Image: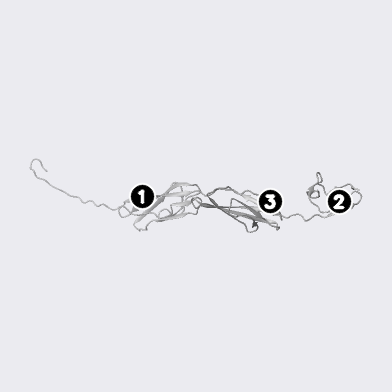
Amino acid sequence: IDNVTGCNLQKQISVQVFPLPSFSIAGPTTLCAGEDPKVYSTSSNQNYQYNWYTDNAEITTPADINQVGVNWGVIQGTKNLNLVVTDKTSGCLADKKITVEVWPMPTFDITGPTQICAGEEAQAYSTVNNMNYTYSWQTEKGVITSASDKSQTEVNWGTTPGTKTLNLEITDNTNGCYAQKQIDIEVQPSPEKPVMELKSQQYYIFICTDSGQIYQWYQNGIPISGQTKQFYFARNAT
């Protein structure tokens, strides 16, 4: 408006408002530490440019397409996956984030003998006892002689020498995560039943004719103290 003449002039401009890219992210949001990479995706649009990124995981595929693979690693915790989508026709962009909860896997060890002789009695093996855990013991070359769903089990390794394995799978009932562990058992061949010869009737000199490294003489099922050589000398009781 001109203050002297009172004349006025008007002008108008048009403003075009472009829409922001609209999208969502699909993929698992809860998983177990140490699992294989997971797939995450969004809608595919040839006019869109994609940029996936994360600060506490590893992207295992190209990060500039509508689908990506992510390895969340072995460390538990709350982690994030981010996606920026740009509309190439307008330059408008939008970003979105999803939160992924990585649950811990059960941690445990197996205790028990790993070297035994063939033909020995059943051996006991155990692990941590946790009321939230489900246990599953397995072996292919031995016989589990007690409960296989407890924190402790017993295994008869039989009479055949060789390397054998004992497997344990534990599932955490609070989150469904599970872990497996295996130990090797070396079953050594047992020596054959020794053969003894009586060399003298007068003094009762017994000799074990089998060569070995360790000897122990017994009388009536009781070890004779100090008698650990290949021969045993006994006086004639008469």
Nearer-N-terminus badge (3/1): 1
Task: Tell me the distance, in whole angstroms, between the alpha carbons under discs 3 and 1.
Answer: 59 Å
Crowding at mark 3 (Cα within 10 Å: few <14, some 14-19, many 20+): few
From the top left corner, tell me how far across and down residue 132 is, in percent.
Answer: 52, 49
Residue located at (46% from left, 54% from top): 38
Name the one closer to the observer, 119 or 103: 119
Q: Amino acid at mark 1?
A: Asp
Residue under label 2? 206
Count the marks: 3
Closer to the camera in the image, 199 or 211: 199
Instruction: Mark 2 or mark 1: name the one nearer the start of the chain.
Output: 1
Q: Secondary structure at mark 1?
A: strand
Q: Residue furthest top?
A: 4
Colour scheme used in the picture?
one colour
Label 3: element kind: strand
Q: In the image, what residue occupies the spot 70% across and 52% down?
A: 116
Give the residue number, with chain letter if any, for mark 3.
115
| Label 1 crowd (10 A; few <14 / some 14-19 / many >=20) | some
Indicate the position of residue 206 as horizontal and vertical percent values.
Answer: 86, 51
Pinpoint residue 6: horizontal percent, then vertical percent: 8, 43
Distance from disc 3 to disc 2, alpha carbons, whole Å, reads 32 Å
Label 1: which residue? 95
At label 3, which amino acid type do we have?
Gln
- The residue at the point 84 percent across, 49 percent down is 231
The x and y percentages for residue 158 are: 69, 57
Q: Give the mark, 3 or 2, whose residue is nearer the N terminus.
A: 3
Give the residue at x 40% y 51%. 52
- Contact flag, marks 3 and 2 (Cβ < 8 Å): no
Which mark is in front, 3 or 1?
3
Name the mark on residue 9. none
Q: Is residue 193 left or right of residue 90?
A: right
User: Of the residues tagged 3 and 2, which is closer to the observer?
Assistant: 2
